[in-house]
């Protein structure tokens, strides 16, 4: 029963993460750009974490001086720029395309690990990568040159979001040996927010004029798919292994695609549906291969 409870929490976190693109797409209808949206999201989320940590558990604020360069990379590139790239992809393409492109990061991590850490590549790993890449190619409609040319900048942003999240994965993997997950998310969001503060100050008069509906969407993005989902996932790891949690994480792109179809009425061609299934199968098998090799 403890395992079942953990699985439910992870499933809930994954589905909640899947709402991020939907909320972003709704926010863009009010004219906000992806950079400003992420600036406010990081500012709100980091402040929300900082206040209780500073009052109740100050030891989580401490990081070693030798780790500061990694913290800067984590905050500026792997957090701030990664989130901007993802939401830029959502803005220029569709939620489904953006989340599937983002979810190719395990492929990049696997390739990097095999080259630099000499991790063994199995036949299952090769098949998983092939299925994921083929699925992505179908989802972004590489078979339709005119459409691909039209959405090329959005696809490039989605690929960049995947590359930068692979960086996030590798940097946090190393830092977790010394710090808790809450320290890393606090510093990642905090440094990212500081890097983007000048952009907030430049647009301050415009930001203060945002309608209440847009502010509710910004707060929802900062709290629901970020902090609350992360809290659910972290709590779930008390009951299940992180390897199991990673595999269940493929519910995120599946839920994002479902939400986009239901809420945003995004339509899919038959080949895109085949691609979605192929990409999800490839990523799920890749998680399985990496955690059981």
Image (cartoon, rainbow, N blue to C red):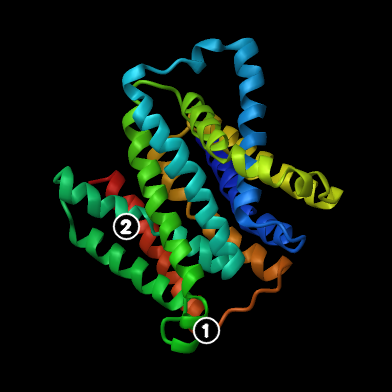
Locate residue 219 relative to residue 211 in the image: left or right. Answer: left
Asked if residue 144 can be seen in this view, the reply is no
Say how many tags the image has.
2
Q: Position of residue 40 (x, y in %)?
A: 66, 42
Q: Where is residue 108 in the image (x, y as percent from the top left)?
A: 31, 55
Mark 1 highlights which residue?
270
Asked if residue 182 can be seen in this view, the reply is yes
- Quadrant assignment for the N terminus: top right
Mark 2 is surrounded, within 10 Å at the Cα level, by few (under 14), some (14 to 19) or many (20 or more) other residues, namely many
Locate residue 132 relative to residue 52 in the image: left or right. Answer: left
Q: Residue placed at 19% from the left, 62% from the top?
A: 123
Rendered position, 130 above or below 212: below
Quadrant housing residue 143? bottom left
Viewer-side residue, 274 vs 99: 99
Mark 1 is surrounded, within 10 Å at the Cα level, by few (under 14), some (14 to 19) or many (20 or more) other residues, namely few
Q: Point out the tag, 2 or 1, that comes first from the N-terminus.
A: 2
Residue depth check, mark 2 versus mark 1: number of the one nearer the observer: 2
Q: Position of residue 50 (x, y in %)?
A: 61, 22
Mark 2 highlights which residue?
107
Label 1's element? helix
């Amino acid at each position: 029963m403890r395992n079942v409870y953990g699985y439910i929490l992870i499933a809930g976190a994954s589905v909640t993460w899947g709402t991020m693109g939907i909320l972003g797409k709704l926010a863009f209808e009010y004219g906000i750009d992806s950079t400003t949206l992420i600036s406010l999201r990081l500012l709100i989320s980091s402040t929300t974490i900082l206040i209780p940590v500073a009052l109740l558990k100050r030891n989580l604020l401490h990081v070693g001086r030798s780790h500061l360069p990694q913290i800067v990379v984590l905050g500026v590139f792997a957090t701030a720029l990664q989130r901007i790239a993802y939401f830029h992809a959502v803005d220029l393409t569709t939620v489904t395309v953006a989340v599937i492109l983002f979810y190719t990061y395990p492929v990049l991590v696997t390739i990097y690990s095999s080259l630099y850490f000499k991790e063994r590549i199995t036949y299952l790993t090769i098949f998983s990568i092939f299925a994921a890449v083929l699925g992505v190619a179908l989802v972004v409609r590489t078979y339709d040159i005119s459409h691909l040319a039209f959405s090329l900048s959005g696809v490039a942003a989605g690929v960049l979001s995947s590359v930068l999240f692979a960086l996030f994965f590798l940097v946090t993997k190393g830092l977790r040996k010394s710090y808790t997950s809450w320290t890393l998310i606090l510093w990642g969001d905090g440094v990212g927010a500081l890097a983007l503060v000048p952009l907030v100050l430049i647009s301050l008069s415009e930001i203060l004029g945002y309608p209440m509906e847009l502010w509710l969407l910004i707060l929802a993005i900062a709290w629901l798919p970020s902090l609350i989902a992360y809290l659910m996932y972290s709590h779930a790891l008390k009951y299940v292994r992180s390897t199991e949690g990673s595999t269940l994480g493929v519910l995120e792109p599946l839920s994002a695609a479902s939400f986009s179809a239901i809420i945003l009425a995004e339509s899919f061609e038959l080949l895109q549906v085949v691609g979605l299934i192929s990409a999800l199968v490839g990523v799920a098998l890749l998680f399985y291969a990496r955690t059981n090799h």
